Image (spheres, rainbow, N blue to C red):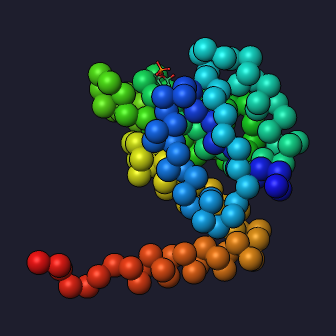
Amino acid sequence: MSSPKVSIIMGSQSDWNSMQHATTVLDELKVPYETKIVSAHRTPKRLYEFCDDAADRGIEVIIAGAGGSAHLAGMAAAMTWLPVIAVPMSSKQLKGMDSLLSMVQMPKGVAVACQAIGDAGAFNAGLLATQILALQDPELRSALQDWRANQTASVAEEVAR
Ligand code: RP5
């Protein structure tokens, strides 16, 4: 098993149901990744240690999913120079609007690439991580182009009635 290039972190085990969609494209295109529970407020020391050595361990992109007051992605982006893709989790009270706004409204100076709320956002986070890695990897780029062509070919022109 090659060492992970993408790290998928999430604030809680309860985020996995949505965050598992981030692994779809990574699995299909054989991009090595790891999955970890790292909470900005429940495990702040774990978050610090994770950010401290992520780049040294060969991680190139971080995907961070969290719900509610979702500071995980912003804190991760603040503590590492690696690109951070944020996925707002749907929440009980505000259906993920809280997560979305706290992730997308990053103040100037620290960048987070925020995706859509929930499953689609998680899926696209895996896709975007693959696109970032493909910049430096011609084999992966070719596999990604095939993946996109297959997706296009799978869309029927005629409406099934
Ligand atoms: C956040 O609180 C997590 O990212 C999760 O989305 C939410 C609820 O966590 P649990 O109470 O289910 O552990 O930190």
| Residue 60 drawn at (x, y percent) | 75, 51
Outermost residue on the top side: it is 42
Q: Quadrant of the C terminus?
A: bottom left
The residue at the far left in this view is: 161
Give the image location of residue 97, x and y in percent.
Answer: 34, 32
Residue that extends furthest to the front in the rendered view of this protein: 1
Q: Judge whether 29 appears above or below 114 on screen.
A: below
Q: Residue 1: name its quadrant.
A: bottom right
Left or right position of 128 against 18: right
Q: Is residue 94 left or right of residue 132?
A: left
Q: In which quarter of the image is residue 153?
A: bottom left
Residue lying at 45% horizontally and 41% vertically, measured from the top left: 18
In the image, is residue 145 above or below residue 131? below
Q: Please report the residue visible at 49 percent of the width from the left and 56 percent of the height from the top.
A: 124
For the residue pair 13 and 108, the one nearer the viewer reads as 13
Give the percent coordinates (x, y) of residue 146.
57, 80
Residue at the location (42% across, 31% down)?
99
Q: In this view, does 23 lie above or below 100?
A: below
Left or right: 88 with respect to 64?
left
- The answer to whether residue 142 of the structure is visible from this angle is yes
Q: Is residue 131 visible?
A: no
Question: Which residue occupies the foreground of this view, 73 or 8?
Answer: 8
Q: How many numbered discs sit on the rendered protein?
A: 0
Where 158 sits versus 123, above or below? below
Residue 50: image quadrant is top right
